[in-house]
Amino acid sequence: MTLSDARARVPELAAPPHDPAADLRWLGALADFCGRYTPMVALDPEGALLLDITGCAHLLGGERALARDAVARLAGLGLGVRPGLAGTPEAARALARFGHGGARGEAEAIARLPVAALGLGPEAETALIRAGLRSIGDLAARPTAPVTARFGAEATARLDRLLGREESRITPRRPPPPLSFVRSFAEPIGRVADALAALSGLAGEAERALETRGLGGRRFEARFYRGDGRIRRVAVATGLPTRDPELVSRLIAARIEALADPLDPGFGFDALRLDVAATDPLLPEQIAAGPPEPGSRERAVAELVGQLSARFGAARVRRFLPRDSHVPERAALSLPALEAEAAAPPWPAPAEPGPPARPFALLARPEPVAVVTEPPDGAPARFLWRGATHDLARREGPERIAAEWWAAPGDLAETRDYYRVEDSRGRRFWLYRLAAADRAPRWFLHGFFA
Amino acid sequence: MSDGADPLAAARRAVWIDTEAEQRVPLGAPLLDGALGGGLARGRLHEIFACEAADATAASGFAAMLATRLPGAILWLRRAGARGVPYPPGLAALGLDPARLILATLPDPTALLRAAADAARCPGVGVVVAVARGESRALDLAASRRLALAAERSGATVLLVRIEARECPSAARTRWRVAAAPSLPLAGRAPGAPALRLELPRRRGGPPAGPWLMEWDRAERCLRPFGETRGDTFADGVLPDGAALPGAVPAASLRGPDPGERRIA
């Protein structure tokens, strides 16, 4: 039926344009929703979701109960769902698309599927039906060699995957975490504090699982599934591997507290999931009695870094590594403290005696200043910055810092002449001059000395 | 009362024990250490006020100088958008190992105070430096009491740097007032070692002390009276180029009580 036919019959018909990208986004949101059943969820662009529920079904009382729960919940979002359960993803997809029910057992249901379930295209389909092969069962009963000869290797391969003769796996949409723990509630939880209490229970499960593997978690992700299908994801990271459930709950609570958009339970959370997204080896250790050892101080600092990073964002808490570059902006590498290695290269000790050659604080972006120079060498005598004039009583320079030869034009690619200067009141600054052949030199303020 | 003794005496004893148990870190200059009763108290709250807004780097630099004298990890807390970011090679040039430093940039004064309290509570941290600019209602007496208490429990030394802020009552053990001072120039009028004008307007158990004109000896990592680092203190007999030293007094004219005197507050 064409659109004009349909419009002729139902004048009030609404016909929005097809938006495949939006459909795929919606399917992605539904895939996240199904993360409550298993971390292994894949998208089928033809409007299907594939869930690998190996080892997850018992949490909801079996495969059928899980399927019923999924259908009921998705129906609650206004969706019609056809479930299919089978040993391979291809079989499950074919059963959902073409299954009629009424079969006893998976093998019989697959055998009764039409050959269209192979998805070989209309031409091959017609050829199969002309050959008298109407169902998958008919085709499976044939010897393989003639089928391959007549319909190609693709047909046999598809048949093998459909029948489970060949192993096949889904490619999950998100890489599955090493460990994942789920808890569903019969009644939704309406308070964040209660959800956090349930989460610390999951953290306890995670601790036991990590302990038997000799691992500690570096990244934890909590997902809160709301009754109306919304999902909130809260991730925290730790500097050192840990499996302490109290620490993990505390970090997640701190992160939630710091959320700009607070965690709103709405009509309640009906499932929680805790993933251990990254792990490192962590061997059991003896708890020493007595004064704290150096190792425990480091651990306390690592915990503090984790806590501050969870509360204020990992990018706000940083450590510094030395870099072998004479360009001032590149002499120190700033890393989120959570990621910085403890065994960093040592900082080179300043060799030359005398006052510090580098400023105590650096401006994030050098600021242009107006400078009065004095002859004969054009050294600065006075400068104006942010409306204040500084008369310079002392100065040293220039220290010429050339660009790295491999720098791209515009990327700190100018040669700078730095001056250490001190004004009449003892304030010390780091100025530089950009000399250009064709115009007057420009001056910038780059840092402050203590 | 268990032994029927005077409760006031017991309280006095407790205070006495408390002060006795304080660990002090000498700053290397007998002038300052005398005024501090042996050195800077570890595991306590200290305030450092910049005299003027332009003395911000001097005040932060003084905090960094104190941090070099104290052991352990340094948690440096600053506000986003503050003038200048601590520069690791510059810290190394002062004698402070940048590997000890963790720098946190906080969005607002409340967050800064909260992070400072978290850090002060952490037993693994040696020094917490919090740089706060401007007046803030969050930084009141109660907040400073909380910080002081957390520092005492964990043993972390908290240095609260205040810029463009009025001095108000607090629970700090000492309060410093810091300004930049003209340095003793090197050959060719080059700026010399970092020079600071220090004042102790408040200290536990003593009247205000200072001001002193000090300079930082980065080889020895200690503060010295102005000019002493070069060894030839004013060898030529004149203050070089006669620069104005605002409010500075010669280092020798220390006023304040005899360092041996002890009081119980």
Image (cartoon, coloured by chain):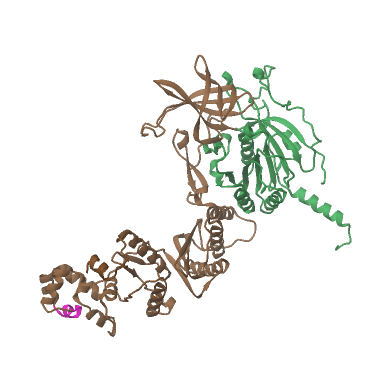
Chain colours: A brown, B green
Compared with residue B246, is residue A98 higher up or lower down, i.e. above or below? below
For the point 62% across and 38% down, the residue is B60
- Using the image as rendered, state which of residue A59 and residue A325 is in the foreground: A59
A243 or B170: nearer the viewer = B170
Residue A78 covered by magenta stretch: no
How would you classify the magenta stretch by its main secondary structure?
helix
Please identify the quarter of the rendering in which residue A449 is found. Answer: top right
Q: Is residue B98 left or right of residue B177?
A: left
Rendering coords of residue B177 (x, y %) = 70, 36
- The question of residue A141 being in magenta is answered with yes
Q: Which residues are magenta?
A: A135-142
Asked whether the viewer can see residue A243, the reply is yes
List x then y, in percent, for residue A234. Answer: 49, 60
Q: Quadrant of the N terminus of chain B?
A: bottom right
Quarter assignment of residue A55: bottom left
Q: Which residue shows up at 52% across the image and 48% down it?
A: A316
On the image, the x and y values in percent for residue A350 come to 53, 33
